[in-house]
Amino acid sequence: MSNIVKNNRLLPAIILSVVCGLIAGAAGEIVTRVYFLKDFSVPYFNNEVNLNDLNNNRSNLIIRDAKKVVVSQDIKVSETINSIRPALIGIFKEIDGSKATSTDYYKLDEPFLVGLAVTADGWVAISIPDDIKKTLNIKNYVAITSDRKVYKLDQIAGFNDLPGSLTFLHLTAASNLSIKKIVLRSDISLGQSVLAINGFSNVFLTSISSFKKMSPVLSSDSLNSRFTFAGDMGDEYKNSFVFNLAGDLVAIIGTDKEVIPAFSYNAYWQSFFKKGVISQPVLGVNYLDLSSTKSLGISLEKGAWLYKTEGALAVLKNSPAELAGLKEGDIITWINNQELDANNDLANIISNFNPGDTITLTYQRNGIEKEVNIKLGAKK
């Protein structure tokens, strides 16, 4: 009995000792942080780590169970630029090695043109103003990568009709070039931050302010989509490239400052790299996108409504669509397993196929759903 009483008397003293020890430990950590580490943040109560607040006394950072890590936009933009630079290719007027002197040099931050590597073996996408393209002799130019390797140019694609005056140059004996992923339409949203880059020293941070079509009535066989950005970037950003903050290619800005989504080009340059020619698939219809228009006589809120204007038929003569039996007033709702909606426009879907591919097209006619297989043609 006496032992039990003695233990009960000791229990408060033990608890008090433990509490005092914890308080002393916490106080010691606070003193160490404030007077030695110069860290004035409050420990224990905040699981948010702001990388901007790190000081020189905390060079070694270990994050355990942080609920939120805050990285400033400046840091993210800087990281993005550094990840993009290896894919940018500067085009310079060649200095004749046989006549060069010790004072001749290439000014790397002032290229004549800037391209973007799109294949590891040397193909470079580049938007060339028409007046320059007419007289451009690639034998008089060299390409220099961010790691200062110099390449001769041996091929230029003879395209004259791609939006943005886009064409392709090839670097002799190039390999292992850094290439960037093309952003899908479904991964692009209004208000999204993007970087326009022209050269190795011009960068413009902006955001996507609108996603629009070139006209109300669209062609299934054209690049209809365009972006606009918040703020005027100025003429120096003509013929440049636009990336998201992950460093993926979002758009190409042409000579006339039109902003063409990169996904619109994807099928074109893929066919070029595989076959050596631009191979454009053709369905042969003109339509209104019901995701962005409202018809008084149609209850559907998405789909491609085949529509005729004074200058264009709804279904082109002798086109794959006409041969398959499509008619004015039909509403295309699905292509294979892709539903047409605000993120999946008919022209964008068709551009992902090759001439000769067979697609399964679902459409409505007078409220009745039908399905037909169509073999896509090729644009002449």
Image (cartoon, rainbow, N blue to C red):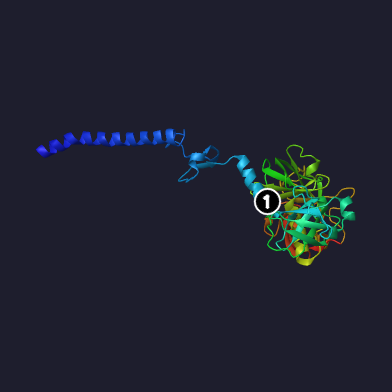
Identify the image quadrant of residue 352. Answer: bottom right
- Residue at 78% from the left image edge and 66% from the top image edge: 275
Q: Nearer the viewer, residue 199 or 166?
A: 199
Give x and y (percent) for residue 34.
43, 33
How many marks do you count on the picture?
Answer: 1
Q: Nearer the viewer, residue 157 or 362?
A: 157
Q: Is residue 364 visible?
A: no
Q: Nearer the viewer, residue 193 or 212?
A: 193
Left or right: residue 113 versus residue 119 is right
Residue extending furthest left? 1
Left or right: residue 369 versus residue 128 is left
Assess disc 1: are there few (<14), some (14-19) or many (≥20) residues with their C-alpha within 10 Å of its C-alpha: many
Q: Amino acid at mark 1?
A: Ile
Identify the image quadrant of residue 11. Answer: top left
Q: Quadrant of the C terminus?
A: bottom right
Q: Is residue 32 above or below residue 227?
A: above
Q: Secondary structure at mark 1?
A: helix
Which residue position holds label 1?
A: 84
Give x and y (percent) for residue 79.
62, 47
Q: Quadrant of the N terminus?
A: top left
Residue extending furthest front? 102
Left or right: residue 52 versus residue 112 is left
Give x and y (percent) for residue 4.
13, 38
Q: Is residue 32 visible?
A: yes
Give x and y (percent) for residue 58.
48, 41
